[in-house]
Image (cartoon, grey):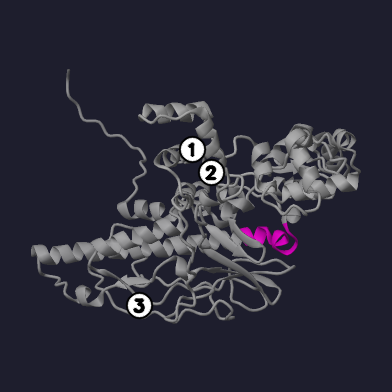
Amino acid sequence: MKQSLQLKLGQQLTMTPQLQQAIRLLQLSSMELELEIQQVLDSNMMLEVDEEDTDVPDFMGEAASGVTVGGDEGGDFGGDEGDSGAEEYAAPSTTDDIPQDLPVDTEWDEIFDNTLSATGPGSSGEDGSGEFENIRGVSGSLRDHLLWQLNLLPLSPLDTLIATAIIDALGETGYLEVSVEDILEVIKAGGADADEDEVEAMLKQVQALDPPGVAARTLSECLLLQLRELAPDTRWLEEAQRVCEHHLDAMGNREFNQVMRRMKLTQDELREVMTLIQSLNPRPGSRFSEQPPEYLIPDVYVRKLRGRWKVELNPDSVPHIRVNPYYASMIRRADNSATNNSLKTHLQEAKWFIKSLQSRSETLLRVAAAIVERQKAFLDLGDEAMKPLVLHDIAEVLELHESTISRVTSRKYMHTPRGVYELKYFFSSHVSTNMGGEASSTAIRAVIKKLIAAEAPDKPLSDSRLAEILGDQGINVARRTVAKYREAMHIPPSNERKRLG
C-alpha cells in the first residue's frame, strides 16, 4: 500500500471549554446554579462573594434596571426608557482592575466586569428582609404518633405486641393493608401465643386512637369510625352512618335518586347528609406523610409600571461574586514558577466563570422580555388570552438557536401579578379557528375549565357537548382533544362530576 499526502478542505465545529461552561450554566436551575457557584468558590482562590455590593435597587423602586415592554403601541428591545419603553438593562460596572495580560480562548469581549450583580426587584439586605424562612413544625410519622399513644395505655406485653404488629401493617394513608389472619400468623411466627379474637380486640383498640378512622380496612369503615367520634346530637348523624354503611357505592356512582328512594330522603336532606360525610377525612394518615413544601425561587420578576410591563432579574437568584483583588495583584508577568502559573490559571478560570454568569443573566433577561412582549394579553386578561407560541418564534426574534431558548426556559420561573409560572408555560401549540386565526391550547383549556365550572351540577357537560360549544365560539376541536385537555387538568369525566342540583 503506497503512502501519499492529500489536502482536504472541510468545516468543523469546535466548542471551547468556556463555551461549554456557558451552555451548561444556561440550563441550570436557580438551586443548581447556587450549588455550582459554591463549588467554584470552594475550588478557585481567585473568586469570592462580593458582600460589599449593596447598591441593588429595591423591587418597588422605579430605577431598577430591566426591560420595559411597551404598552398598546408595542415595544422593542432597543432605545432608552421614556416614551418608547425600551431596554434598560445595563451590565454591571467594573469596580476592580484585573490583569489583562492572560490569553483567553474565547470570542467574548475582553472588556469584562469582575462582579456579577443582576439588578432587579428586591435585595437581601443585612436586615434579612429579602429572605423567606420556612418555619415548619416537626411532626413524627403516623407509626410514631400511634406508638406514643399506645405506650400510655395499661396493656399487657402480648397486647402491646399485637397492637404494634397492627400499627406496623398500616399504610401511609392509615388503612390496614393486611388481614387479621396475616397479623396473627406474624405474631405466632414470633413465638407468641394469640388467637383471632385477641387480634380483633386490639384492632378496635388501635382504631380508637388518634387520628379518627385510623386502622380501618375499608373506606366505609374509616368513615363510620369518624362518625362515631361525633357528638350524638349531630344533625344527620344517623343518616350519614346509614349511607356509609349501605349506600356508599351508590353515592360514588352518582346514583342519587336511588339513594333518596331507599332512604326516603328529599334532595335537600341528602345534600345535608353529603355535606356531613364530605367533612370527614377519607385518608386519616395522610397528614403524617406530607412532604414539606418546596418553594420556588423566581428567576425573573414582571410588574406593570406606568401602563407598561417591566421585566427584571431576581438579584437573589445569583450570588454576587468577584475576583479577589489581593490574589490578582500577586500575579507576576515574567514569573514562570509553579505558584505564579497556578494563580494565572485560577484567574483565567475566574474570568471565564464570571463571563458565563453574565451571559446567562443577559440571555435569560432577553428571553423573558420577548415572552412578555408576546404574552402581554395573558398578563392583562388571564389564561383565556394566551397566544400560541413556540420556541422558534422567540429564537427568530432574538436571533438565537431554538436549543438555547429551550435551555433558558427549562426550570426557570417568572413571578407575575397572576402567579409564578415556569417560562415553558408560556409556550403552547395552537388550534385553527373559523376566522382564520389561531387559538392557544392553554387558552382552550382555560375556556373548558370555565365552562365546566359554570355547568349545571345535575347535568354536567360531556366532552362532545364541550366540543360543540367551542365550535360555536369558532374553535375547531375534536371530542378526543377536549378529553385530552380535560384529563391534563385532572378534571373527571361528566359521569363523575354529577352532583345534586
Mark 2 belongs to which amino acid? Val
The three-letter code of the residue at mark 1 reads Ile
In magenta, the rendered stretch is 371-382
Secondary structure type for disc 2:
helix
| Vertical arrangement, residue 115 with respect to residue 160, above or below | below
Badge 3 density bin: few <14, some 14–19, many ≥20, Cα 10 Å: few
Question: What number is the disc on residue 206?
Answer: 2
Q: Earlier in the sequence, mark 3 or mark 2?
A: 3
Q: Kindly report the secondary structure that dominates the magenta region of the rendered protein.
A: helix
38 left or right, relative to 122: left
Q: Earlier in the sequence, mark 3 or mark 1?
A: 3
Q: Quadrant of the N terminus?
A: top left
First in sequence: mark 2 vs mark 1: 1
- Crowding at dot 1, Cα within 10 Å, few <14 / some 14-19 / many 20+, comes out as many
Q: Is the residue under label 1 in contact with that under label 2 (CB below 8 Å)?
A: yes
Residue identifier under label 1: 166
**Vertical placement of 283 versus 297: above or below?**
above
Point out residue 16 in the picture as x, y percentages from the top left corner. Answer: 32, 51
Q: Is there a contact, CB below 8 Å, between mark 3 and mark 2?
A: no
Residue 406 image position (x, y, % from top left):
52, 49
Residue 351 visible at all: yes
Give me the C-alpha separation between circle 3 and circle 2: 56 Å
Let me know if residue 374 is in the magenta part: yes
Above-or-below relation of 345 to 494: below
Picture coordinates of residue 487, whole percent (x, y): 69, 39
Identified at 57% across, 40% down, the residue is 204
> For the residue labelled by badge 1, is the local secondary structure a helix, a strand or a loop?
helix
Nearer to me, 486 or 299: 486
